[in-house]
Image (spheres, grey):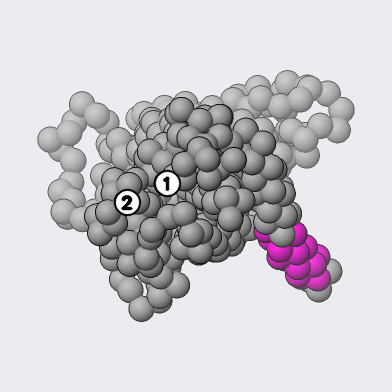
């Protein structure tokens, strides 16, 4: 029968170790470590493992309780193990075990009935596992005999506590990353949005290749028109410059030199737009309130309505890009933002 | 794309098998640890480790 007491101790120690593993898995849930492991193990595997190990922990705890009840050396009834401070024998360690058992049962039952509970109520009950574990560790330490030869069993609560503390420290460190700047939080590339905003407000109407005679530059079109990179949505179509000398904006292209290069085929890699104020284009005649108004004559600008966009104001182009409407608003496939719990 | 769908379904089944296998292996490891701890406790246990048992009874 003494062997049964030893079995009960072994079951309790393994249950404590499993509880530490379950708590560490729960603490590391949705952290960067989980995401790193998620390349091999998806997140639902880790969540399912957390749930399965919790159920196995309950089984080991129940076996520990049953063997304690069966052992004839301990004068304990079932209610002594459920209601704290009702046992006359070894009251404090037994009470700690009873509190830990009650909290564990509350967590498991609330998780089983999760669909009937609100998320907040379930979370409040679930977070009591952070109370259950230290109480269980205190129960294990208080029941250990420092005078006997089994003092080494204290290594098990030590290892379990180390697991949980390491997981919590990692979770805390993972949450300490600085927040993304506002300009980087959107789903739109800020540089691309700036170019699109320039196009949408008319501040980048026409581009002309400065070094048209350069070996890498695209060949000019017939009639003196400069080469303008064609876009699929035809955004540059209304802004085709009739004459390179009279174009109000000049652009220099950086392309590969010589031969059948992408630049010669009409695909420009980069365009640097230079404004030439004072030159009139058909676009200016069509839209007098556009970007040709000099900055020094702000008082002479035509009045805009409150909701009309200021063509000279591109201060929000870098930060607020999701609100742009129209086909010019680019949507760049950026990875989704990490969700915070 | 049926090929990709089939691959995703196969991967999902593999992940579910991984859950079951990992759970089973951890359960087996816990059971083995119980046996090992029991053996260690029995080997190193003294009368002071057993509650309410006198030294004479323990012997």
Look at discs 2 and 1 and give the one toward the viewer. 1
Provide residue A178's location: percent of width, then percent of height. 38, 30
Say whether residue B16 is magenta: yes
Say whether residue A111 is magenta: no
Image quadrant holding the C terminus of chain B, namely: top right
- A186 and A280: which is toward the camera: A186
Q: Secondary structure at mark 1?
A: loop
Question: Residue, x 40% and y 75% (percent of image)?
Answer: A113
Provide residue A67's location: percent of width, then percent of height. 53, 60
Image quadrant holding the N terminus of chain B, namely: bottom right
Count of labels shown?
2
Question: Residue, x 83% and y 23% (percent of image)?
Answer: A258
Question: Residue, x 55% and y 29% (percent of image)?
Answer: A149
Question: Residue, x 33% and y 73% (percent of image)?
Answer: A117
Query: Pointer 2: what residue?
Result: A89
Residue reaching furthest left? A299
Report the chain holding disc 2. Answer: A
Q: Are marks 2 and 1 on the same chain?
A: no
Provide residue A132's location: percent of width, then percent of height. 37, 50
Q: Secondary structure at mark 2?
A: loop
Q: Which residues are magenta?
A: B4-23
Label 2 neighbourhood size at 10 Å, few (<14), some (14-19), many (20+)?
some
- A133 and A94: which is toward the camera: A94
Label 1 neighbourhood size at 10 Å, few (<14), some (14-19), many (20+)?
some
Query: Pointer 1: what residue?
Result: B52
Residue reaching furthest bottom? A116
Residue A111 drawn above or below residue A272 = below
């Amino acid at each position: 029968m003494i062997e049964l007491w030893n079995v009960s101790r072994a079951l309790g120690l393994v249950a404590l170790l499993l509880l530490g593993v379950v708590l560490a898995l729960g603490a590391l849930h949705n952290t960067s470590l989980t995401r790193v492991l998620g390349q091999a193990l998806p997140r639902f595997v880790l969540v399912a493992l957390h749930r399965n190990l919790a159920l196995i922990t309950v089984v080991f705890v129940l076996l520990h309780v049953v063997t304690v009840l069966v052992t004839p050396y301990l004068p304990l009834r079932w209610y002594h193990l459920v209601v704290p401070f009702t046992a006359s024998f070894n009251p404090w360690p037994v009470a700690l075990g009873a509190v830990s058992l009650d909290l564990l049962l509350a967590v498991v039952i609330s998780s089983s009935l999760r669909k009937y509970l609100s998320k907040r109520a379930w979370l409040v009950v679930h977070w009591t596992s952070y109370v259950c574990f230290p109480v269980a560790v205190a129960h294990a330490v208080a029941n250990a005999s420092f005078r006997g030869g089994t003092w080494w069993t204290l290594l098990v609560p030590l290892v379990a506590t180390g697991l949980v503390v390491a997981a919590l420290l990692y979770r805390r460190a993972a949450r300490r990353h600085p927040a993304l700047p506002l300009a980087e939080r959107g789903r739109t590339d800020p540089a691309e949005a700036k170019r699109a905003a320039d196009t949408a407000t008319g501040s980048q109407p026409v581009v002309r290749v400065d070094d048209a005679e350069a070996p890498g530059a695209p060949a000019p079109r017939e009639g003196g028109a400069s080469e303008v990179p064609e876009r699929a949505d035809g955004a540059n179509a209304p802004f085709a410059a009739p004459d390179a000398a009279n174009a109000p904006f000049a652009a220099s292209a950086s392309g590969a030199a010589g031969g059948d290069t992408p630049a010669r085929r009409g695909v420009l890699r980069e365009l640097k737009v230079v404004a030439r104020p004072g030159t009139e284009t058909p676009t200016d005649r069509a839209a007098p309130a556009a970007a040709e108004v000099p900055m020094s004559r702000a008082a002479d600008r035509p009045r805009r309505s409150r909701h009309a966009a200021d063509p000279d104001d591109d201060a929000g182009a870098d930060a607020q890009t999701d609100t742009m409407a129209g086909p010019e608003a680019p949507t760049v496939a950026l990875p989704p933002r990490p969700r915070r719990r | 794309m049926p090929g990709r769908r089939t691959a995703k379904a196969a991967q999902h089944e593999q992940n579910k098998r991984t859950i079951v296998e990992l759970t089973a292996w951890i359960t087996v490891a816990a059971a083995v640890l119980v046996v090992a701890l029991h053996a260690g406790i029995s080997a190193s246990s003294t009368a002071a480790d057993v509650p309410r048992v006198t030294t004479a009874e323990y012997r």
